[in-house]
Amino acid sequence: MSPKNRQADVTRSCSTPALPANWPPEIKYLTDQTCTTAVTPEQQSTLGRPSPDSENLQKIPASSIKVPYPWLSITTIYEPPTHPARGQRGLFAAQDLPPNSFICLYLGLVHTNDAADTDPSSNYDLAFDREAGLSIDATHHGNESRMANDYRGISERPNAEFRDVLVQVPCAKRAGGVKWERRVAIFVLSAGRAGKRKVGVRAGEEVLVSYGKGFWDSRRDAGLLNEVDR
Ligand SMILES: C[S@@+](CC[C@H](N)C(=O)[O-])C[C@H]1O[C@@H](n2cnc3c(N)ncnc32)[C@H](O)[C@@H]1O
């Protein structure tokens, strides 16, 4: 199977939710992640399996997950003229977001790291579970999180970061009908020891993460840096 033909497992996708303003119509808006058919039941079950690491993860209650997220806006960037992603979309705070606050889940197509299930040219692919060999690609399926730009060339430093979290998902086999499963989320950075980031992300400010140096190095090596992405 080539990555271009890889299939989302539609049995786990959601029915038509309200779309955020300025959502690109060609991208499927997700309310939870969905897997390619190449992801095995065993790989899927690792996401809900308790481990020493997962015990320390922050739990995001269902009530914190809004669809669409009212505290976010998706904006096409025209200003400043020097913005390196000008003409593309970016993710902005629609209200003040305090340090350490949950911004949104990073949703997309969960795929295996096998070459046949991976699109090496994706600009939206995030490592999810290295041990299970899973990543999340939000090229064609995603939510607001796929609009978050990297801070480089825009600000001195990021104001947000990716964190592993646990969310509640329906599970007929468990008491209460729900279980905790791993996801990736974007959070406002903490205030820092000296309190330098105590304002968090102000209303109107762009949410900026770090993609990591590896993201830009791999694009430079592949000669993709000046390519229009979509
Ligand atoms: C995950 S997407 C971010 C959302 C994207 N701007 C959009 O409109 O869909 C990653 C792509 O955004 C652009 N981008 C993000 N941060 C950037 C930055 N600091 N400088 C230049 N381009 C950036 C690049 O084209 C990159 O491949």
Image (cartoon, rainbow, N blue to C red):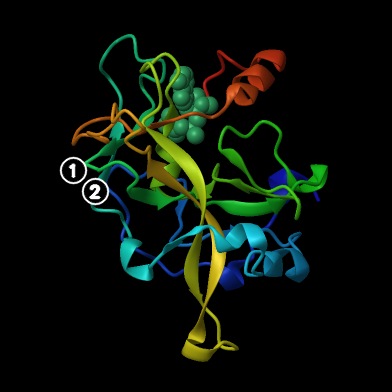
Residue drawn at the location 35% of the way across and 62% of the way down: 65
Residue drawn at the location 57% of the way across and 32% of the way down: 123
SS of the residue under disc 1? loop
- Of the pair 211 and 156, the residue shown nearer to us: 156
- Residue 15 pos. (x, y %): 44, 70
Left or right position of 43 against 229: right
Residue 125, picture quadrant: top right
Residue 119, picture quadrant: top right
SS of the residue under disc 2? loop
Marking on residue 127: none
- Whether residue 3 is visible, yes or no, is yes
Instruction: Give the residue type at disc 2.
Output: Trp
Marking on residue 95: 1
Residue drawn at the location 70% of the way across and 44% of the way down: 4
Does the numbered disc 1 mark a residue whose Cβ is under 8 Å from ligand 1? no
- Residue 203 pos. (x, y %): 18, 36
Of the residues under marks 2 and 1, which one precedes in the sequence?
Answer: 2
CB within 8 Å, label 2 to label 1: yes
**Residue at numbered disc 2:** 71
- Residue 208 pos. (x, y %): 39, 30
- Of the pair 16 and 84, the residue shown nearer to us: 84
- Distance (Cα) linking label 2 and label 1: 6 Å
Instruction: Give the residue type at disc 1.
Output: Gln
Q: Is residue 66 above or below residue 143?
A: below
